[in-house]
Amino acid sequence: MKTALLSLWWLRMATFSLAALAAASATYWVLKWQATVPSNLTAAVVYTAPPAADPQVVARLLGGGQTSVSAKRVDSAASHFKLSGVLVNQASGDYAVISVDGKPAKPYRVGAHVNDDLVLHSVAPRSASLATSRDAPVSVTLELPKPTQASTLPARAATPTPKQEE
């Protein structure tokens, strides 16, 4: 009986030693692998900027290129301009789609000359400001027209219609 007990004791010690050696080896390689990985890559955040908007495409989407017919002409400076849309984008710059003297609307970047006397001074979400120079005070403020009743209604969510089997 003693010989059987001694042989089991030797087998248990050999198994424990082999398991401890495997755990130590695994710990060594994990620590070595972590030391080779740069620390700045472990917390890297990947951000891709949205593509820059093409002002000509935005002008066409907002109705640029269409002639506007006005029944009355007032001789004030604001009557010569009609704001069709704005694009506020920090990456590619701010633009306003403006029709000058009834001509087709074109996109103007902030700081660009709208006519001989005025430049586009600034753009807000629903308005654009014109001034004699980029540093001068605003002389004309153009507002987008108020939305119509049809455009303020909430859009209905598209719900799929169940197909009827025959």
Image: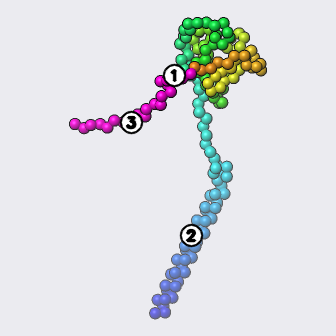
Position of 82 relative to 154 (above/below): above
What is the spatial separation of the Cα atoms under label 3 and label 2, in whole angstroms?
A: 59 Å
Residue at x 51% of width, y 88% of height: 6
**What type is the residue that disc 3 sits on?**
Thr
Which residue corresponds to the image point at 61% horizontal and 24% vertical from the top-left? 126
Identify residue for label 1. Answer: 148
Residue 50 appears anywhere in the view:
yes
Going from N to C along the chain, the mark reached first, 1 or 3, is 1
Display colour scheme? rainbow
Nearest the eye: 90 or 157? 157
Q: Which of 130 and 97 lies nearest the eye of the viewer?
A: 130
Q: Amino acid at mark 2?
A: Ala
> Looking at the picture, how far across and down is residue 34, in whole percent?
64, 57
- What residue did someone put label 2 on? 22
Residue 159 shows which numbered tag? 3
Asked if the magenta segment contains residue 149, the reply would be yes
SS of the residue under disc 2: helix
- Identify the image quadrant of the C terminus: top left
